[in-house]
Each structure stands twice: as structure tokens, then as C-alpha cells.
Amino acid sequence: MNYIAIMAGGVGSRFWPASREARPKQFLDITGSGESLLQMTVNRFKKIVPVENIFIVTNKKYKDLVKEQLPELTDNQIIGEPSRNNTAPCVAFTALKLAGLDPNANMVVAPSDHLILKEDAFLTQIQKALDFASQNDALLTLGIEPSRPDTGYGYIHFAKEAADGVHPVKAFKEKPDLAKAQSYVQSGEYLWNAGIFIWNVKSILKAFQQNANEIYQILNADQSAFNSIGEQAYMDRVYPTTPSISIDYAIMEKADNVYTLPSDIGWSDLGTWGSLHAESPKDDDNNVVLAEKVVLAEAKNNMIRLPKGKLAVIKGLEDYIIIDEGDVLLIYPKSEEQEIKQVRKGIENEFGEEYL
């Protein structure tokens, strides 16, 4: 059977001050749709698997938030990480858990906070990838056909030859400078790396044994713990002792059976306020306004988010991020938004955790 593992444990620090430690961006209605990003992701996947086959991997302290937003999930479908050890231990633990439920399980690993504008195309590609993974010893990643030479994404260099539209991966490339990104896009041999993975549990667990055996051995010390009432206690004990490393570094860059499926799905990782601005409906002056009451004059290309009932009068601002969360007001140049993560760190150093 097919299963979905949705990763929902991050803090989303570049979406501060809306995204907070107590309620990160995946739990927010960041797009104004009426649903959180997590709820949107689950509802998308419910179209291809039953809800009982969807698992949420989150930080342990967010388990109650997940239950609040997804009451249809059982406790066994919510995996609570006791520590943030990056994505490789998270994937390994989930694969071991699913293998205990179904030794032949195929699984999708997907982030909880990405935007997919072409949902039907996305689900078609996911189903195609699952079919391929079920028939082949393959580690598959969804590659996004680049629409521009973006320097904020990693890239996948893929081979021309293909089987069922699936291409072998030659190499993964780190975020490039603009000139290199332009050459990548012009060559037609590169895709954006979206961090969406598809494989059979046997394939990924074999890959861990071959390429990241320490993680496999630590987490698989007691197979009887998975899907039992003692699973959380077991995870609390062993999980923090695993190396903190991403699935890309631990597995994907080392394995020799990595493939990609080029996809045009209207994807954005929604990593920053600027990316939300780029993907959202705009007024005649290119402003994105997520607010009830705003008066704008000579204001262009801004990202504006206000609390319910708050009135703002804004004149003369261009290319700014304006986020009012009640206790924190952020007014920041959109061109310098990569600094927000560090600004948040500075706020912590000066004022403590009150505003995080």
C-alpha cells in the first residue's frame, strides 16, 4: 500500500514574526485560504490515499497542535520527535514504523509547508512516482522544472535517458550564484530540488544500512517498539542520540539508485515572505494585502499582513514587508528578507524568548 509522511516539525524562522515557536508557519493560515499549510497538505494527499495512511512527523511539543488541526488522525499517525536532528533520522524512523505496519509499503516524504498551485498535475506525478518505486529499487525525488534562474534553491542534474519519464540523477548541486543558475536553466538538464521523496520502505532502509548505518542501528535497536504504546518512550530514548544530518547528505548524495521525475506543478517552498508575495494575488500596485482594513497611497510591491480588525494607513512604501502580529510589528525591506532569521536571533538575545 501507499503511505504519506508529512514533515511538520520546523520553526519557519524566516516567516517571523507570524511563525513562532509555539505555533510555526505550517500551523498558520499563511495564504488567507482558511486552512493552515498543514491542513492544505493533508487534504491534498487525501485524494490519493485514505486518511489512515497519512502520518505526520513533528516535534513532540506540536503533537497537540496536530491533533487540534487534524482530529481525524489517530495518535499512532502522529510521530513526535523529541529533538530536532534534521531529516535523515526523521525519515529512517518513519520508514521503520511503516515497515512494521506493511513490509511492502511505498511512501512519500513531503514537507508540510509548500505551495502547490497545480494540484492535479502534482497528484498525477506522485502516483506515477509511487508506481515506479513499487516496481524498482529506486530512491525517487520530484524535480521541479525551473521557471527562472533562482539562487535560493538547490538543483538536480539529471541524465537525458528516461524510463516512464523517470531520469537517473547525476548529481545534486548546492544553491548556485546567479550566473551558474542561469547556465543550469539554459542547459535544460537541471531541476529544482523540492525535497519531496518517493520510495519503497525496503529500498530506503537498505540505503540507510549502506550509507547511514549508524542511524539505522540506533533507531532499529528494538523493532517491537514501533507502533506500540511504548513507541514514544523508545523514541525519546534513542532518537536524540542519532547524528543530525539531512536526508540529502546522508542518503541521496551517496546512493547509486537515485532518480528524478521532472514536474511542472506550480511549486513554491514558501520559504520567505517574498516567496509568499510572489505566489499570491496582488492589487493593481503589486501589493499583497492579507488584512481587512488597509488604506494605501503611493505604496507598491509590498507584502502586508495585519491582525483581524486592525486598520493600517500606509503611504510611500515600496518593496517592503509589513507584518503586524499584535505584539510584534515588522517593517523590513523585501530585498533584505534573508536577514529576518538573524533579526529573530538578535531579538532572542536582547529580549529573551517572549517574542519568538
Image: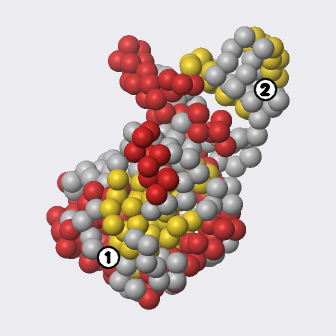
What residue would you read off at disc 2? Answer: 285
Question: Quarter-wise, where is residue 42 in the image?
Answer: bottom right
Q: How many marks?
A: 2
Question: Quarter-wise, where is residue 179 in the image?
Answer: top left
Relative to 75, is 254 on the left or the right? left
Label 2 residue SS:
loop
Q: Which of 119 and 43 is in front in this view?
A: 119
Kind of residue at disc 2: Asp
Q: Residues within 10 Å of mark 2 (few under 14, many from 20)?
A: some
- The residue located at (19%, 73%) in the rendering is 210
What residue would you read off at disc 1? Answer: 257
Label 1 residue SS:
loop
Residue 219: percent from the left, percent from the top?
25, 66
- The residue located at (35%, 53%) in the rendering is 173
Residue 312: percent from the left, percent from the top?
76, 16
Q: How crowded is mark 1: few (under 14 residues within 10 Å), some or many (20 or more)?
A: some
Q: In the image, which disc is placed on residue 314? A: none
Residue 338: percent from the left, percent from the top?
46, 29
Q: Who comes first in sequence, dot 1 or dot 2? A: 1
